[in-house]
Image (cartoon, grey):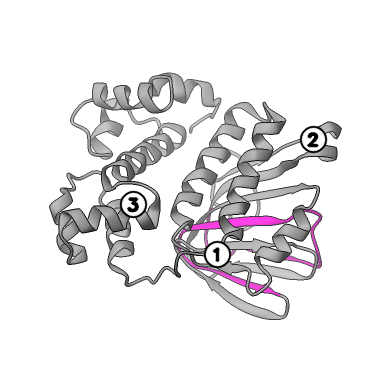
Amino acid sequence: MYELGPGILPNSLCVPLTPTAHAQALYFYPVLCGHYFCDRAYQVSRDRYDNPLLLFIRSGVLRVQYGGRKYRAEKGDIVLLDCDQPHCYTAEEAVEFLYLHFDGIGAHALAHAIAEESPLLRREENIAIGEQLFDMVQAYRRRGIETEALDSLRIYQILMQLAMPPRSLVQQDSPITKTVIYIREHVGETIPLQELADMAHLSTFHYSHEFKRQTGFSPSEYIINTRLEKAKMLLLQTTMPVSDIAYAVGYESGSSLSNLFLKKVGCPPREYRKNSGLSVK
């Protein structure tokens, strides 16, 4: 493993990307992305940076200073910075986050417009955006830039989700948010729909409807995607056997996990790990 800088833990991932002149002239394009695990020594302080920045907090707290104001970004929050003025972000405690530096025609203006009121975005859509960003980072880690137009579309879709009026602000104590957090923290367990509905004090019908409205996924789809996400992380960051990973994410056998990977990813778990090119120590 390699050292990325003070406060960035060894299992972190940083992926620099080199856009073509064609992409810079026509599209949105990724410049740098990663998946960081940091301790309290982590801090970034800059007068400015050339490319806008998108952050998704997966756990912990990141303190952000921008535009003369201070913000506290927590689990599930998105931070969007145009980076055209002094900014600083610091780990208040152990923190895990995904990030993407991007650019392109109109990228700065769009980032500024989206974050005009505040760079700290708390929305129902954040969960789905975090999933998209995770998949983007892993794809760039494995393959780099492949299709400029598709890369541009992915970035644009994320920004459009943030540009659209939010359905409502996500409250940490809302019933649906509580069950989402429960799913992510108990991904290796059996999670009955009735149990989730009871936690939200709703019937299973109304719970499923409201969950879909707020997250874009049915409860079962979200559980499957969460298991898949966790399995991908374990494949890339550990040497655990596939059978053990399957058990860790709630499946009774490696074949069940392999079937999921074939359906959702297009290859079995071992091939996914091999193709990542990640050297795990």
Residue at horizontal 26%, vertical 24%? 254
Helix, strand, or loop for circle 3? Answer: helix
Report the disc number at residue 238: none
Graded by Cα atoms within 10 Å as few (under 14), some (14 to 19) or many (20 or more), the crowding at tag 1 reads: few
As shown in the figure, which amino acid type bears the numbered disc 2? Ala
Helix, strand, or loop for circle 2? Answer: helix
Q: Kindly identify which residue carries mark 3.
A: 212
Query: What kind of secondary structure does the magenta stretch mostly adopt?
Result: strand
User: Is residue 60 located in the magenta-colored stretch of the structure?
Assistant: yes
Measured as percent of width and height from the top left, residue 38 is found at: 53, 57
User: Closer to the N terminus: mark 1 or mark 2?
Assistant: 2
Query: Where, by quadrant of the figure, is residue 231 drawn?
Result: top left
As shown in the figure, which amino acid type bears the numbered disc 1? Pro
Query: Where, by quadrant of the figure, is residue 150 drawn?
Result: top right
- Cα separation, mark 3 vs mark 1, equals 18 Å
Measured as percent of width and height from the top left, residue 128 is found at: 45, 50
Residue at horizontal 47%, vertical 57%? 125
Q: Kindly identify which residue carries mark 2.
A: 23
Residue at horizontal 64%, vertical 39%? 153
User: Is residue 230 located in the magenta-colored stretch of the structure?
Assistant: no
Circles 1 and 2, Cβ within 8 Å, touching? The answer is no
Decide if residue 221 is on the left or right side of residue 197: right
Graded by Cα atoms within 10 Å as few (under 14), some (14 to 19) or many (20 or more), the crowding at tag 2 reads: many
Which mark's residue is nearer the viewer, 3 or 2?
3
Q: Is residue 7 visible?
A: no
Q: Is residue 125 visible?
A: yes
As shown in the figure, which amino acid type bears the numbered disc 3? Lys
State the extent of the magenta-drawn residues as a range: 37-66
Measured as percent of width and height from the top left, residue 105 is found at: 81, 48
Q: Kindly identify which residue carries mark 1.
A: 165
Task: Give above or below for 41 relative to 98.
Answer: below
